[in-house]
Amino acid sequence: QVQLVESGGGLVQVGGSLRLSCAASGRTFSTYAMGWFRQAPGKEREFVAAISWAGGNTYYADSVKGRFTVSRDNTKNTMYLQMNSLKPEDTAVYYCAAPGRTYYMAIGGSYDYDYWGQGTQVTVSS
């Protein structure tokens, strides 16, 4: 089993920045890819970013490219999402997730992920 706990959400003004963290436990962190998703009220959960197990490969949704950066520190069992130039449309609950398989690069589809955190709210005010 994998336990994931997000933190770092909050209220920020347009153009501001936030850094989300996802602390993982229960499995060797460095053996599995990780992803970030978000869900706004009344909308489906959508892919935001993903990172490979060693951190050498990253993937982003078009809507966040150039503004968000995903990273991980395998010595701390933690993944991060640095969010800059935030927009009102970035307002959502942000979730971190992990696939059930090790050494599997899951990109885009939430069906590829088996473990989810409880989410952290990000609100961007205009």
Image (tube, grey):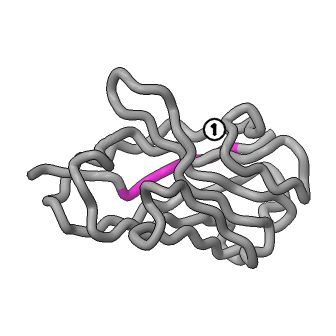
Chief SS of the magenta region: strand
Q: Which residue is mark 1?
A: 116
Query: From what the image shows, is residue 41 above or below residue 79?
Result: above
Q: Which of the two residues, 30 or 15, is positioned nearer the viewer here?
A: 15
Query: From what the image shows, is residue 125 above or below residue 32?
Result: above
Q: Position of residue 115 (x, y in %)?
A: 71, 38
- Label 1 sits on a secondary structure element that is strand
Question: In what quadrant of the picture does the N terminus appear?
Answer: top right
Q: Which residues are magenta?
A: 3-8
Q: Position of residue 118 (x, y in %)?
A: 51, 36
Q: Quadrant of residue 112?
A: top right
Q: Position of residue 119 (x, y in %)?
A: 47, 40
**Farthest-out residue, top:** 42
Q: Quadrant of residue 47?
A: top right
Query: Along the horizontal axis of the image, is 21 left or right of 123?
Result: right
Q: Quadrant of residue 83?
A: bottom left
**Farthest-out residue, left:** 126
Query: From what the image shows, is residue 65 above or below residue 109?
Result: below
The residue lying at 40 percent from left, 26 percent from top is 43
The residue lying at 77 percent from left, 58 percent from top is 33
The residue carrying pointer 1 sits among few (fewer than 14), some (14 to 19) or many (20 or more) residues within 10 Å by Cα, namely many
Q: Position of residue 20 (x, y in %)?
A: 43, 60
The residue lying at 73 percent from left, 72 percent from top is 57
Total tally of numbered discs in the picture: 1
Residue 17 lies within the magenta run: no
Query: Along the horizontal axis of the image, is 55 left or right of 14?
Result: right
What amino acid type is highlighted by mark number 1? Trp
